[in-house]
Image (spheres, helix red, strand yellow):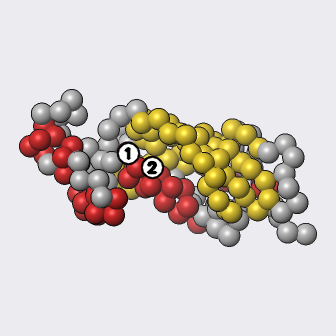
């Protein structure tokens, strides 16, 4: 059984650079998007666009109702990834993200993340290396909300 198939309590914590191989896939638990999430994110980001905050105005847009901020969806995705524990004490940085939003997320949607190792640095540094993940954020009916690539820097196993 690969680490990605183990129940959360048996998932290895703090995977090192050497533990990541091409094709290794991880899936998070879900997290349901709430109205409070949208309101708090608007307050933090300053993005009070009516499509996020005003149901009546948003109803007249192509979205036909309020939708979550794209960056809120991505922020929740990073939180879900960190909660898996695979980066605990070993993630140096998320060095970059390339994100394409595919469908809107709405209050009540349950988001989950699938991460697949798509590139492993062929010549890592002495203390760290780069791992690139293909990341899908989906809701409960498997609709893809966002596709992204995360470039990470991960510690190598200490000698």
The residue where tag 2 is placed is: 74
Q: Which of 108 and 92 is in front in this view?
A: 92
- Classify 10 Å Cα crowding around label 2: few (below 14), some (14-19), many (20 and above): many
Q: Which residue is drawn at 65% across and 59% down?
A: 93
Secondary structure found at label 1: helix
* Horizontal side, residue 131 vs residue 85: left or right: right
* Horizontal side, residue 91 vs residue 157: left or right: left
Q: Residue at x 21, y 29 (%)?
A: 62
The outermost residue toward the front is 46
Q: Nearer the viewer, residue 111 or 42?
A: 42
The outermost residue toward the left is 56
Q: Do the residues labelled 1 and 2 touch (CB within 8 Å)?
A: yes
**Where in the figure is residue 86, as x and y percent of width and height?**
64, 60
The outermost residue toward the top is 62
Residue 134 shows in this picture: yes
Q: Which of 120 and 21 is in front in this view?
A: 120
| Label tally | 2
**Where in the figure is residue 2, as x and y percent of width and height?**
70, 49
The outermost residue toward the right is 159
**Where in the figure is residue 45, as x and y percent of width and height?**
34, 59
Residue 115 shows in this picture: no
Secondary structure found at label 2: helix
Q: Nearer the viewer, residue 42 or 144?
A: 42
Q: Residue at x 71, y 48 (%)?
A: 131
- Name which quarter of the figure residue 159 lies in: bottom right
Q: Residue 70 carries which label?
A: 1
**Where in the figure is residue 46, as x and y percent of width and height?**
30, 58
- Classify 10 Å Cα crowding around label 1: few (below 14), some (14-19), many (20 and above): some
The CA distance from mark 1 to mark 2 is 6 Å
* Horizontal side, residue 125 vs residue 110: left or right: right
Q: Residue 143 carries which label?
A: none
């Amino acid at each position: 059984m690969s680490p990605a198939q183990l129940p959360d309590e048996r998932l290895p914590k703090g995977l090192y650079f050497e533990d990541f191989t091409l094709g290794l896939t991880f899936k998070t638990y879900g997290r349901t998007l709430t109205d409070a999430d949208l309101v708090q994110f608007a307050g933090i980001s300053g993005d009070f666009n009516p499509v996020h905050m005003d149901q009546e105005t948003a109803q007249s847009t192509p979205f036909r109702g309020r939708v979550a901020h794209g960056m809120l969806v991505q922020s929740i995705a990073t939180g879900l990834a960190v909660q898996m524990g695979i980066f605990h004490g070993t993630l140096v940085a998320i060095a970059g993200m390339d994100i394409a939003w595919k469908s809107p997320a709405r209050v009540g949607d349950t988001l989950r993340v699938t991460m697949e190792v798509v590139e492993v640095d062929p010549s890592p540094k002495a203390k760290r290396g780069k791992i690139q993940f293909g990341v899908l954020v989906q809701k409960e009916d498997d609709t893809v909300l966002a596709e992204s690539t995360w470039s990470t820097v991960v510690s190598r196993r200490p000698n």
